[in-house]
């Protein structure tokens, strides 16, 4: 069973230890001084880290990225989902982290998405950190999206 966690600085309480990552040094949450907006969502999932990682890059890939046969893991390789999300792999550390550019078909700009999995007691923490969002509205939309994704992960492993 997971318990709510309170986060200081930007007090929020979410089930399954959700953290809306916002820098305390910014005047406006999620706004970066030089490159737009960012958002992060983190949750504890009741499964070992490797099992979560395998799911994220296998059966669960459509949940967070879109329909794609497999995601390349080599830096510099491009990908595209069947629904038009495209990008390039920027970094990959097996079992721990993937960083990629992420651009839906109807967006005029690309963004950077980092997915990280780490150990937390008997379970794992999954974190989605999305950078270079265009504005507050895009940030708000992606915050909702990543909360839905992490909620689905928690439910899948419950």
Image (cartoon, grey):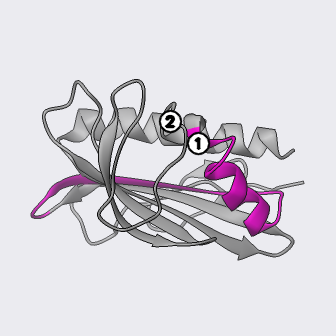
Choose between 13 and 150: the one closer to the eye. Answer: 150
> Would residue 49 be seen by someone viewing this image from the given angle?
yes
Residue position marked by numbered label 2 in the rendering: 68
Magenta stretch holds residue 47: yes
- Tell me which residue sits at (29%, 47%) in the image: 87
Packing grade of label 1 (10 A; few <14, some 14-19, many >=20) is: some
Which part of the image, by quadrant, shows the C terminus? top right
Q: In this rendering, which labeled residue sits more in front, label 2 or label 1?
A: 2
Question: Tag count in the figure?
Answer: 2
Q: Are marks 2 and 1 in contact (CB under 8 Å)?
A: yes
- Tell me which residue sits at (20%, 31%) in the image: 107
Residue position marked by numbered label 1 in the rendering: 61
> Would residue 44 be seen by someone viewing this image from the given angle?
no
Magenta stretch holds residue 14: no
**Magenta-highlighted residues:** 33-61
- Tell me which residue sits at (22%, 24%) in the image: 106
Which part of the image, by quadrant, shows the N terminus? bottom right
Choose between 60 and 72: the one closer to the eye. Answer: 72
Q: Secondary structure at mark 1?
A: helix
Residue 128 is situated, as x and y percent measured from the top left of the image, at: 49, 55
Q: Could you tell me how far apart the alpha carbons at marks 2 and 1 are, in whole angstroms? A: 8 Å
Choose between 40 and 9: the one closer to the eye. Answer: 40
């Amino acid at each position: 069973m997971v318990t709510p966690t309170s986060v200081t600085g930007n007090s929020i309480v979410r089930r399954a230890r959700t953290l809306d990552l916002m820098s305390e040094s910014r005047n406006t949450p999620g706004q970066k001084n030089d490159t737009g907006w960012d958002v992060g969502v983190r949750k504890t999932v009741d499964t070992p880290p490797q099992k979560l990682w395998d799911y994220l890059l296998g059966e669960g890939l459509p949940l967070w990225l879109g329909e794609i046969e497999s995601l390349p893991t080599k830096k510099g390789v491009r990908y595209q989902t069947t629904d038009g999300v495209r990008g390039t792999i920027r970094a990959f550390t097996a079992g721990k982290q993937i960083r990629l550019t992420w651009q839906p078909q109807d967006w005029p700009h690309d963004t950077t998405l980092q997915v990280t999995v780490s150990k937390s007691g008997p379970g794992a923490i999954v974190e989605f950190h999305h950078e270079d969002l265009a504005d507050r509205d895009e940030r708000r939309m992606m915050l909702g999206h990543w909360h839905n994704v992490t909620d689905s992960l928690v439910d899948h492993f419950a």
